[in-house]
Amino acid sequence: MNNRVRVLRTERGWTQAELAEQLDVSRQTVNALETGKYDPSLPLAFRIARLFGQHIEAIFDDGEGR
């Protein structure tokens, strides 16, 4: 799944560790999200969307374009 987590994080000047702390996950989880090696659970996707003030669909794209 494609996502904009890295772009949104860097726009705010946050490190992976800072984002991880705000989301209550490990820095490794943030890294895996940003590199596309991990798709978040629905609750985590909602936390990410709320933190960045965006809809889930604006951050995550399943590539199906529907």
Image (cartoon, helix red, strand yellow):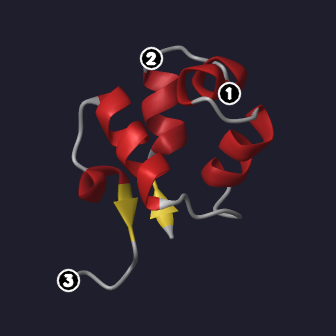
Q: Quadrant of residue 15?
A: top right
Is residue 62 shown above or below 27?
below
Q: Residues within 10 Å of mark 1 (few under 14, many from 20)?
A: some
Q: Position of residue 33 (x, y in %)?
A: 62, 52
Q: Secondary structure at mark 2?
A: loop
Q: Which mark is on residue 12?
A: 2
Q: Are marks 1 and 2 in contact (CB under 8 Å)?
A: no
Q: How far is the residue under mark 1 from the one under mark 3?
A: 30 Å
Q: Mark 1 against mark 2, which lies toward the viewer?
A: 1
Which residue is at a point 30% across and 34% down the rendered structure image? 50
Residue type at numbered disc 2: Arg
Residue type at numbered disc 3: Arg
For the C terminus, the image quarter is bottom left
Q: How many marks?
A: 3
Q: Which mark is on residue 16?
A: 1
Q: Secondary structure at mark 3?
A: loop
Question: Can you identify the residue that label 3 sits on?
Answer: 66
25 vs 34, nearest the viewer: 25
In the displayed structure, does residue 34 sit left or right of residue 8?
right
